[in-house]
Image (cartoon, rainbow, N blue to C red):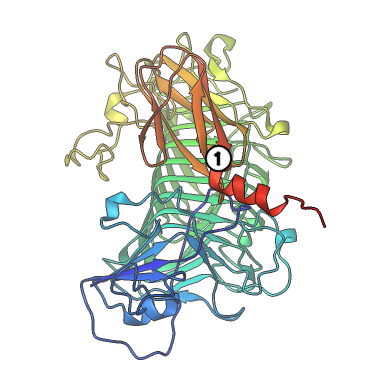
């Protein structure tokens, strides 16, 4: 059977993030398997046996106790916390946990996990300063030190459609600990504002090789690996479409710290992460294979982008590193007794001198551009020539938290300068065509990786494109994304979500005309120029009448 979990609506202060988890309880388990289990804290009129949305369990731990390998737990929008500060949510092996439901869906594809915020929080006493933590100052009182604990991360285990936030304390893995096994999937998850004095503010991985797909790490902190710490000789996670933004650590690896087998990554972003050493990544005797990557504004005393030490082997293909900062060593990569290889990549905006120490372009670079380094052989561009400066759409302004737009203008010297043979195979089938042996077919924007015959340098392939911005002009709600780059003639899609007790009034554009597709999804088709979209929200008429009646004055 399938298990559904639904909670009451989140308060109007909620942000646009989503998440949910499961709590272990000693309640005796009924024998079930290969089904769906429902949980809904508002289902007070039902039988509360988890068999439907109307009869959903009122508590998460009831659903978890009932679940067996092969079951699914469906969780509707709401806020969930562990029982107390010493507790965490534990997911059994082979159970798939899905959040982001409204509470009336009959098919998994019907859910809208962004609109239906499902949050798992460490705020067990309900007194934090913010629903979604951005800083340790948002934490008040005792919070759970770990939100999710997974001891067997094997095939069939999945967490999908949640926001994990507000872990605070000691121990490894503030947001989530993943241990022992290969094949677990974490997808469509935001890990935001989790803090630990130990390893892995967002996630700690030990002797496990999970797949992280469409996962965002923001504002997490730890001693090593602010976003994620990868540990153990049997660990080699895969990161696909993952973003690390403004995570930090006190020692090494502001976004990510890895030992052992390291990790593989495709389509990843590292933005404004910070640490004493290795602003974005520290690789300590590990192996990294990273393709289609963007590194902007990361900071570290040594190695603003990457610290690579003690035998580390790092391969970077189709990477743009720009404006990473270090006050004691190279701005981009600091390496010691280790090796970095770059292919079809761009390193620029890191100040005077080489952005990579102990680096020889002839030996370790192919078809790449590194500022202040002569190109040498292997098809590299000369980084000492001003004519080879990349021409981007918009430079970063890091003082104002602006990461720029590092896609190329049509006259950039980096266009068509790559080597198609350096593209790795599409091992993870990013285009969904079932062909995993073809060369990687998409860039960081999921557009075609090769245009006009020869691949470009960096993570983005050039094509004529336009910027579409979005904003809320009145009322309470959200429209996302706030900015997107769209190829000429293609469509821009938006998620428009009203706050509780509000509804969408209208969604309009200047020269682009958005129309409702379904649910909360709006789309403006055939984009031919830069344009903007505005959303407005209003209080429903029936609520407005109630408000007027409540405050109507009478004589006497």
Q: Is residue 248 left or right of residue 554?
A: left
Residue at x-position 66% and y-position 74%: 125
What residue is drawn where x is 46% and y is 24%? 485
Residue at the (66%, 51%) spot, across then down: 549
Quadrant where the C terminus is found in the figure: bottom right
- Within 10 Å of disc 1 (Cα), the crowding (few <14, some 14-19, many 20+) is many
In the image, taking residue 450 as reference, residue 165 lies left or right, namely right
Query: Is 292 placed left or right of 385 in the picture?
Result: left
Residue 555 percent across, percent down from the top left: 80, 53
Classify 509 as above or below 548.
above
Residue under label 1, please give it.
478
Q: Position of residue 102 (x, y in %)?
A: 40, 56
Find the residue positioned furthest to the front: 556
- The answer to whether residue 310 is visible is no
- Can see residue 433? yes
Residue 406 vs residue 479, the one in the foreground: 479
Q: Residue furthest right?
A: 556
Q: Is residue 458 above or below residue 279?
A: above
Judging depth in this view, the residue of 181 and 494 nearest the camera is 494
User: Horizontal and vertical percent for residue 231?
Assistant: 47, 65
**Residue 419 or 496: which is nearer the viewer?**
496
**Residue 106 horizontal/vertical position (percent):** 26, 58
């Amino acid at each position: 059977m399938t298990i559904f979990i639904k909670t009451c609506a989140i308060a109007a202060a909620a942000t646009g993030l989503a998440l949910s988890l499961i709590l272990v309880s000693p309640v005796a388990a009924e024998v079930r398997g290969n089904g769906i289990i429902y949980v809904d804290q508002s289902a007070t009129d039902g039988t509360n046996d988890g068999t439907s949305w109307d009869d959903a369990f009122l508590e998460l731990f009831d659903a978890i106790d009932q679940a067996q390998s092969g079951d699914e737990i469906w969780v509707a929008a709401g806020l969930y916390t562990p029982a107390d500060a010493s507790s965490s949510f534990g997911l059994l092996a082979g159970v798939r946990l899905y959040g982001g439901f409204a509470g009336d869906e009959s098919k998994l594809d019907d859910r809208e996990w962004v609109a239906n915020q499902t949050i798992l929080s460490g705020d067990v006493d309900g007194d934090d300063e913010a629903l979604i933590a951005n800083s340790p100052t948002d934490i008040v009182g005792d919070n759970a030190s770990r939100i999710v604990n997974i001891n067997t991360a094997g095939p069939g285990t999945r967490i999908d459609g949640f926001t994990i936030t507000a872990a605070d304390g000691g121990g490894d893995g503030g947001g989530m600990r993943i241990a022992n096994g290969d094949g677990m999937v974490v997808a469509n998850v935001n890990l935001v504002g989790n803090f630990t004095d130990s390893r892995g503010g967002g996630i700690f991985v030990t002797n496990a090789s999970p797949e992280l797909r469409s996962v965002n790490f923001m504002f997490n902190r730890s001693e090593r690996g602010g976003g994620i710490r990868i540990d153990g000789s049997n660990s080699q996670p895969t990161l696909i479409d993952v973003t690390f933004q403004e995570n930090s650590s006190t020692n090494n690896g502001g976004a990510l710290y890895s030992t052992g087998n390291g990790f593989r990554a495709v389509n990843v972003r590292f933005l404004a992460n910070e640490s004493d050493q290795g602003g974005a990544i520290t690789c300590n005797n590990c192996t990294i294979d990273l393709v289609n990557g963007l590194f902007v504004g990361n900071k570290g005393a040594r190695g603003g982008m990457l610290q690579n030490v003690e035998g580390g082997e790092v391969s970077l293909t189709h990477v743009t590193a720009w404006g990473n900062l270090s006050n004691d060593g190279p701005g981009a990569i600091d390496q010691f007794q280790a090796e970095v290889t770059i292919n079809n990549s761009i390193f620029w905006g890191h100040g005077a001198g080489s952005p990579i120490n102990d680096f020889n372009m002839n030996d370790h670079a192919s078809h790449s551009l590194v500022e202040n380094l002569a190109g040498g052989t292997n098809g590299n561009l000369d980084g000492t020539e001003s004519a080879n400066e990349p021409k981007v759409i918009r430079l970063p302004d890091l003082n104002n938290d602006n990461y720029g737009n590092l896609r190329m203008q049509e006259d950039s010297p980096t266009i068509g300068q790559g080597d198609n043979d350096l593209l790795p195979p599409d091992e993870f089938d990013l285009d969904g065509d079932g062909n995993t042996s073809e060369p990687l077919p998409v860039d960081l924007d999921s557009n075609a990786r090769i245009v006009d015959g020869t691949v470009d340098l960096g993570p983005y392939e050039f094509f004529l494109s336009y910027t579409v911005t979005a904003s809320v002009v009145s009322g309470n709600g959200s429209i996302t994304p706030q900015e997107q780059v769209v190829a000429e003639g293609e469509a821009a899609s938006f998620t428009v979500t009203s706050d509780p007790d509000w509804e969408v009034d209208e969604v309009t554009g200047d020269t682009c005309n958005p129309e409702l597709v379904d649910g909360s999804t709006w789309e403006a088709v055939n984009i031919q120029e830069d344009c903007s979209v505005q959303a407005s929200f209003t209080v429903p008429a029936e609520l407005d009448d109630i408000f007027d009646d409540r405050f109507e004055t009478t004589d006497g």
